[in-house]
Amino acid sequence: MTPERPWRWLLRLLPSDLRIDHGAEMEQAFHEQRREAGARGRAHVMRVWWRAAADVARTAPREHAAQLAQDAGFAVRMMRRSPAFTAVAVLTLALGVGVNSAIFSLVHAVLLRPLPYAEPGALVAVWNRWDGSPAAPMSDPEFMDYDERCRGLRMAASAPASVNLGAGGDPERIPAAYVTADLLPVLGVAPARGRGFLAEEEGRAPARVAMLTHDLWLRAFHADASVVGRTIPVDGEPVEVVGVTPAGFLLPRDFRGGRAAEILLPLPLDRAAPRDRRGGHYLQAVARLLPGVSLEAARAEMDRTVAELVRTYPEQHQQGHFGVVLTPLRTDLLGPARPVLTMLVGAVALVLLLACANLASLLLARGEGRRRELAVRASLGADRFRLARQLLTETCVLGLVGGGAGLAVAALGMKAALTLDPSTLPRAHQAGLSPPVVLFTLLVSLATGVVFGLLPAGQVSRVALDDALRGAGRSSVGGRGRLRRALVTAQVAIAVVLLAGAGLLVKSFARLQSVPAGFDPGGVLTFRTTAPAVRYPGRPEVAAFYARVLEEVRGAPGVRTAGAGSGLPLAVSSGDWGFDVEGRAVVRPRPSADWFVVTPGYFEAMGVRLLRGRRPAEADDERGAPVLFLNESAARALFPGEDAVGRRLRLSRTTGPEQPWRTIAGVVGDVRHRGLERPPRPEMYIPLPQFQHFMAGTQVRDMSVVVKTSGPPLALAAAMRAAVRRVDPQVPAADLRPMDEVVGASLSARRRDTWLIGAFAALALAVATVGVYGVTAHHVAQRRREIGLRVALGAARRDILQMVLGQGMRLVAGGMVIGLPVTLAATAALRSRLFEVMPHDASVLAAVAVLLGAAAALACAVPARRATRIDAAVALRDE
Amino acid sequence: MKRDQRALTPAEFQVLLALADGDKHGYAILKAVARDRDGVALGPATLYTIIRRFLANRFITESGQRPDPALDDERRRYYRLTAAGRAAARADADRMESLLAAARARDLLRRPRRA
């Protein structure tokens, strides 16, 4: 009857059991109501329709809710009745969901939250690029040219620095940033207190005004509002505080790792200076697209600008396909964090999948125990859908309880991840159990409940009906047995993937730690200090300052030797600097090497090997003949098959004085400055008293003092602080730490990844092993009679053992066969995080197979032993 | 079950009333309720959730007796009030009676209505 079809459709909103019991009657009743109303006219029919629909709309939610409450109450009673099952399930879920919540909280904090700027979509990062340098900083003239010529962009820039804050006995070295006056307006950030910088404050060195970041304001000034307008000593100069940034503000460069800047100073940028000296690339630029300007249009305008500049300054720009790239700021800042987070998300998703498979097989096993109960209910008229719904409610309640416990796991996991690596993921320290994380946990818990409940619910309810129809307590278990074995196979496969990933990371980590770094961190203490321009204006004063500091340091008891260098392996690296080689034709671009300034004693204290010639000596001072030292890579690249010692180089200049020809006095071993995984680069070392910067009026002031001690390095910390204080009480010894710690910090991201993936893999191995045990034990119990029969017919213990073990090992083998190709696909994505290990590394894969095989054999051994003890007579009598 | 002890809803009471003067099928109950009640009409979905509940707590049973098959629709089922259902209806009526008496004593009702 067509007029009733919409009605039938409406009735589908009601719970299934009501529909099944009374659906036909409801149709009938409605049919009669409608027929009677039809006799009285259209309006009456419409009213009947309206009332009936309203009735269903009122009834359906109420009935569903009542059913849900009833099912949930039943679920809670069921959970109480089997505490062991509940405990295992909740624990598995807590781990499975918890690790997902922890990683999601990181993803949310790092990737998903908006950047702390107004309309961040219109912000772009601006970088120079040329062959080999896809994103490089720019020089003052370049920045000003781009800014002035690109009308669609409003540009701002910042440069990293560090300054001494405070005066008197206890100054502090803090990270700082020089910024253009319009950096905050470009980012769309208003100061929380006071004002930002004015255009006329730019370009004055030393700075006369400063802005504090919110964190520094809290830490050093105890949130004192009156600090705005006050004068504070910065690098020994009086500087007026004009404003404070809002809480949570980060400069774009603070997203790129390291300690966030705590004080902002106006950039000494001279907009009227001549633009023909274009070296000195140190500015990090950001720009806002003006309203109506698309990224494509801005890029086109920038390309035209670059073409003009290349024509104007061919000597400076016509090399290496020079260009300028505009990248959406979000991509630029957060893109680098994406691969590691993707890897972690993939790993925890696998852990959750594994937990689901484990719980599903656990439920299947329990479902067999509950078959009678379900059969009774089915025979009492509960339909299949109703039973499935009740089972799903049970698993969802379990999921929610497990997810709740998972929040605790997440809180711990997050803390662990941040302890392992506090700094390499931007904004990670802001991760927490925020509302989105809790919501995510809730959804994942429910979804997990549905996923691991679905298979068993479908199976059990079907079987229950079969049983009810057959009126028998026993039926073929083939279907469920197969399903359980498939689930265990899946668990093994997932464990293979995670174990292989962890194995590759562990092997990478081990390889990395055994890489020759080129220095010996043992027993070495380092700290960073500076010679402020107020009291040490020129190179002679700076050199004298460090000579005195080193003299004091070497005089301390327990110090074997000490020196200073502008860099610090694995912590502070430098840029490259071009030069000409005496007796060779001038080539463009010039050969170049990373440059460092050193004092005598630096190589000895750091344990850098001397390969040829000599090390820097006290005689290499202003009056001595100009010398420099190369590392092995530079010597080999410049003078293949020749002796570098005795040859002469002349460094290029930008705005600084003409450089002298320098004689190569020695060749030292390669040092991995930029990371243990990065191959060494050509490097050169220049004695501090002879150093002349390529920029006019610029000095190297910051140096790392390196101290080789005869005892534990940190025991000398107080003595080192005192030594610096004796030379200048206004200069702090910052970043005081053993070199071992510097090496450790450079590996922290890798250590974190290795530990996390390793922990996930261990979890997977444990769960999969329990899965194998469970299904094998079940298998033995099911085949008791058959085994008894075999024993009665004369089967030896060995045969029984072999049969059971073989059955278990087949599961493992199946899991490995499935897991292996998945592993190869998954670990290929890991490639960028591996070091000198191929994703298909045979030894790792073999180790995974052996480990899993051994664990599974152990898991099978217990039920197998039980099988050999089956007494034929007893087993057969039971039936 | 707790559910049995709570007061009946007006719709539930109406269903019991409708069955008090004889076995009825669902549509007949709907019509009887519509006649007795002034106000919101009882719809089929509400009716059958009540019927299911009453069947579960034995206030009503399905009646085996059917009228002449020629007059009947095979989809119809007839329901009969049980002793428990009658007792529940009576208890509810008593409860309302005493409420009304209390209202009358406080002059909230002018005079007893005629039956």
Image (tube, coloured by chain):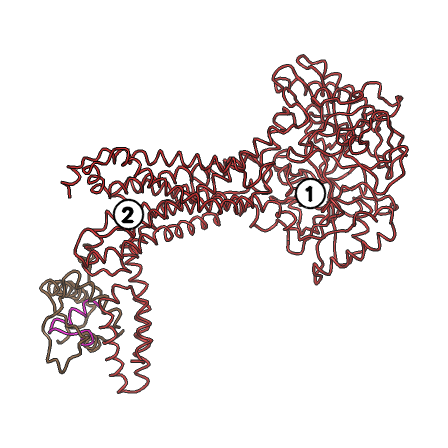
Chain colours: A red, B brown
Task: Categorize mark 1 by other alpha carbons within 10 Å: few (<14), some (14-19), many (20+).
Answer: many
Task: Categorize mark 2 by other alpha carbons within 10 Å: few (<14), some (14-19), many (20+).
Answer: some
Quadrant in which the C terminus of chain A appears: top left
Nearer the observer, A180 or A111: A111
Local secondary structure at mark 2 = helix
Q: Residue A127: give x, y in percent of width and height.
A: 73, 48
> Circle 2 marks a residue in which chain?
A
In the picture, measured across the screen, residue A593 lies left or right of residue A417, that is: right
A687 relative to A104, above or below: above
Q: Residue A182: give x, y in percent of width and height.
A: 74, 49
In the picture, measured across the screen, residue A696 lies left or right of residue A634, that is: right
| Three-letter code, disc 1 | Gly
Q: Residue A674: give x, y in percent of width and height.
A: 68, 34
The boundaries of the magenta stretch are: B11-28
Nearer the observer, A511 or B44: A511
Q: Residue B12: give x, y in percent of width and height.
A: 20, 67
Q: How many marks?
A: 2
In the picture, measured across the screen, residue A209 lies left or right of residue A696, that is: left
Q: Select label 1 or label 2 by which is in front.
A: 2
